[in-house]
Amino acid sequence: MQIVSPYAPFPSVGWWQITAGADVVVIDGHEHFGKMSDRNRYRISGANNSIMLSIPLVKGREQRTAMKDIHIANSYNWQIQHWRTITSVYNRSPFFAHYEPSLYTLFSQRYDLLTEFCHDSLKWCLTQLNINMALEYTTHYLPLYPDATDLRMLKRFDAPAPPYYQIFQDRLGFIPGLSILDLLFSEGPATQLWIQSNAVKG
């Protein structure tokens, strides 16, 4: 099974469920940026509700530009803001301290292109999950992939799954569709098995 996916920072738990059984995942850097999608944002838990962390873009989110050419607006100090929010939310979660040192490197180095940060965040996730995913990258834009599952038209990558422990679940209930960071900080090394057990069958 082949899956075509847009770039996304720290893809959601649902994305990992969908791609878990793929023979190859094709990452499309030549599609146009889609506003109000997960291409430049990821959602984490919060004390009062979920929190959407967005990466600011040069020219904003209204542009019709290939993903590979989207530049990050670094004047907003977004990495400092994201890291402070993540630390504030998850510093007491079971496995945050385990992942903190390596994760911090993604928020301490400068990225000019959105695809660069998305690529490195995906690679970081694959390393922590110990998943050997076959990745390919497009060389040009194709509107259709007839024999593949195409995720590019989706605003979010949701999939049904049983609840797992969340740090604010006692006050908010279970919140589905969060970034894989939420699952990693809660389940740690057991995250890989959780994804495999709840993979979406193609």
Image (tube, rainbow, N blue to C red):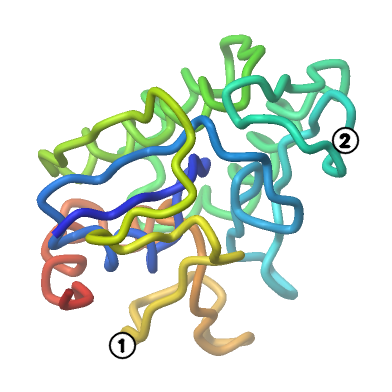
Instruction: Compare marks 2 and 1 and give the one earlier in the sequence.
Output: 2
Q: In this view, does 40 lie to the left or right of 104?
A: right
- Residue shown at 80%/33% (left/top)? 56
- What secondary structure is found at the residue carrying circle 1? loop
State the quadrant of the C terminus: bottom left
Disc tally is 2
Numbered label attached to residue 44: none
Residue 14: x %, y % from top left:
38, 68
Q: Where is residue 83 in the image (x, y as percent from the top left)?
A: 63, 34
For mark 1, what is the residue? 162
Locate residue 27, reporting x and y percent: 38, 38
Q: Is residue 103 left or right of residue 115?
A: left
Quarter the N terminus occupies: bottom left
Q: Is residue 18 placed above or below 94 in the rendered structure?
A: below
- The span from disc 2 to disc 1 (Cα, nearest Å) is 36 Å
Closer to viewer: mark 2 or mark 1: 2
Q: What residue type is labelled 2?
A: Gly
Q: Is residue 21 or residue 85 the one in the foreground?
A: 21
Residue in the image at 12% along x and 67% along y: 196
Near mark 1 (Cα within 10 A), the count class, few <14, some 14-19 or many ≥20, is few
Instruction: Using the image, tell me which numbered label, if any, was put on residue 60.
Output: 2
Q: In this view, does 100 lie to the left or right of 32?
A: left
Look at 62% across and 85% down and name the residue there.
172
